[in-house]
Amino acid sequence: MKRIFRAVTIALAAYLAACGGSSTNITPPPPTGNFSNASLNGQYAFSMSGVDLTSGAYIARIGSIAADGNGHITSGLEDVQDLGSATPTSQVSFSSGTYQIQANGRGVIVLAISTGGTLQWSVSLQSSSQGYLVQTDGLASTSGGLNLQTPLQFSANAINGKYVFSLPGISLASPTPSLISLIGEFSANGAGNVTGGTIDTNDTSSSPSGATALPASSYQLDTTGNGANFGRGMMTLDGRTYAFYIVNSTQVDLLEEDLLGGTAGPAFLQTGIIPTQGSELNGSFAFLAGGSESTGHFGPVSRVGRFAATGTGGIGTISFFENNDGNTSQLTPSSGISNTSYTIDTSNAGSGRGTFTFSNSSTGTVSYVFYLYSPTRAVIQDVSAGVVGSGTMASQSATTFTTTSVAGNYSFSWSGVELVAPSPFDENYVGQFIQTSTAASNLAGVVDFAQLGLNTINTNGVTLNAGVSGALTIGGDGTQSNAYKIAIGGPTPFTVNFVAYFADNGTVFMVCSDGNRTTAGVATAQTQ
C-alpha cells in the first residue's frame, strides 16, 4: 500500500515578491470514475498541519473518524496542537458528520463538533483506503491525508518492531520559535516499551545533531475507551510527549503535546531487507523536501531531485531543482556537480540511516540524512548549511517515463507559501486531474484550495471547484527533470509551473518553478 507523506513547507518570515501570472477561467470537466459515497467506508486516521487563521501560528491535528459508506460520519476524535492558543493542546470529539464523494474521488467532509461548530475538509481519494485532505472552512490552512484503519489492531502489541519516523514542525526551545525536523528510528517491543533507536535533529536554533541514540521510553493506549474505539494512545520519544493514533501495525500517526513545541508526522514499520552497508544501496532515487532557511530572511525552501547510487558510495548521475524563497536553481548532470557521495551508517547498522551529498557553485553543498523504512522508501532530512527541511525519497521503478506510461487519473496535494507583499501566506491545494498520453494540452481536472491571507478576495481565502488545465512535458527519458504548466481557474485565475520527478508511473514529486511561490507536493495515480 502506498503511504501518504506530506513534505512540510513553513514560512518563518516575510518576503517581498512579485505577483503570479494570470490565466483565463476554466470550466471543470464533469466528474468521471468509480468512486462514490461507498468508497469512504470504515474507520480512518487523519494527520494534518499548517497555519492558524487567527494567530498565524503553527497548528496540527491527528485523529480518527468513522464513515458508514452512505454519506454519514458516525463518530470521531482528534488531538490538536495550536501554538497560537493560550492552551495549545486540546482534544475534540465529533458527534456526527456528513460527506459527499463524487465519481472522480473528490468530495467534502463536514464534522460536527460535540461542543458546537463544525470542521470542514475537501478530500481527494486515491483509493478507498487513503486520500489527501485540505481544511476548507477558512478557520485554518491545514493539509494532510487520511488512511483506512484496522480496528482489530488497536492494541499495544500491534506496535511491535522497528519504526521509521519523520516529525517536522516548530520548536519553542529558543526565545524565537524555529523550524525543526526530527527523523529517526525506534524499536517497540509490543508491550508498551520503546527499547531504543536513533534520531537526527535539525533546528534553526542550532546545528544538525547527527545520529543520536534514543533513550528507552514507553507508550500505552488510552484506557478511557479512546484506545479501543479510535486507536489513540500516548508515547514518549527523546523526552517529548506524543499522542498517537494507530492506522495498523505498519503505521502510527504522531502529534507532539508538550511545551517544547509542535511536531507531527508518521512512523512506518521498517520492512524488507534494509541495507547495512553502502554496497547494498543501488539504483536511482527521487526525492522531495520542504522547509526553510535557518539564517537571513528565514524564507521557505522547496527542493526536488533524483540521484543514482552506484553501490560503491558514489553517485552516478544527479539532477536537482530548488526554489529558495522564490529564487530558483536547476542542476543537470552536466552542471558541474562535484563532491557527490552517499553512505549507509554502519555505526547504526540496521537503522536504515544513510546520507547523500553533492556540491555546485550555484547551490553550494546540499546534504541529506535519510532513514529507509523499506528497501525502496525513506524519510529524509535536509541538513544543508542554513536550511532545515523534511521530506520523502522513493526508488525510481522505471528507466523511462513517457506521457503514455504515466497516463491516468491522479489525486494531488500541494502545499507551500505564496510570496506576496506585504506578508507571504500559507496555501494548500487538493484535487484530481486526468493525465492523457497526447503531447500537448494533456491534463484537465479540478481543485479546491485555501490561501491564508486572501480572505479579501475569496470567502475566508477558500476556493472550491476551480477548473484545472495544462500540460506535462517529458524531459529526455523522463527519469530526470520534467515540467508541468497548470492553469487554475476560480475568481482570480492564475498559472503555476512545476519541475517534476517521477518515482514510478503513478507517483510524481513536484516543486513550483515560479518566483512568486514555493509550493510543492505529490500527485498519485488513483487505483479505483
Image (cartoon, helix red, strand yellow):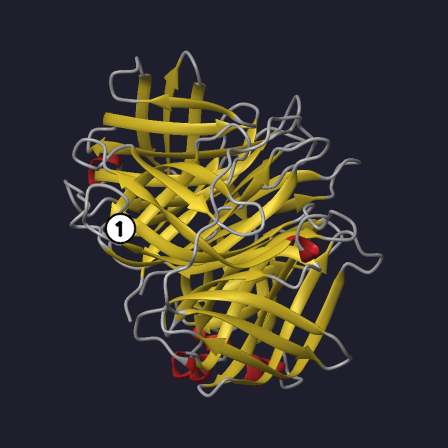
Q: Is residue 237 above or below residue 160?
A: above
Q: Is residue 198 visible?
A: no
In this rendering, position of residue 303 left or right of residue 180: left
**Nearer-the-camera pick, 150 or 95:** 95
The kind of residue tagged 1 is: Pro
Q: Position of residue 363 (x, y in %)?
A: 44, 18
**Nearer-the-camera pick, 243 or 121:** 121
In this rendering, position of residue 442 left or right of residue 141: left
In this rendering, position of residue 110 left or right of residue 33: right
Count of numbered circles on the image: 1
Reading the image, the residue beneath label 1 is: 375
Q: Position of residue 328 (x, y in %)?
A: 46, 24
Residue drawn at the location 39% of the way across and 69% of the way down: 105
Snapshot quadrant of residue 119: bottom right
Q: Is residue 120 above or below residue 51?
A: below
Q: Is residue 142 visible?
A: yes
Residue drawn at the location 52% of the way across and 63% of the way down: 253
Residue drawn at the location 66% of the way across and 24% of the way down: 297
Snapshot quadrant of residue 12: top right
**Nearer-the-camera pick, 40 or 422:** 422
Q: Position of residue 475 (x, y in %)?
A: 23, 32
Q: Quadrant of the C terminus?
A: bottom left
What is the residue that sits farthest to the right in this orientation?
Answer: 86
Q: Position of residue 200 (x, y in %)?
A: 51, 41
**Secondary element at image label 1:** loop
Q: Is residue 401 above or below residue 216?
A: above
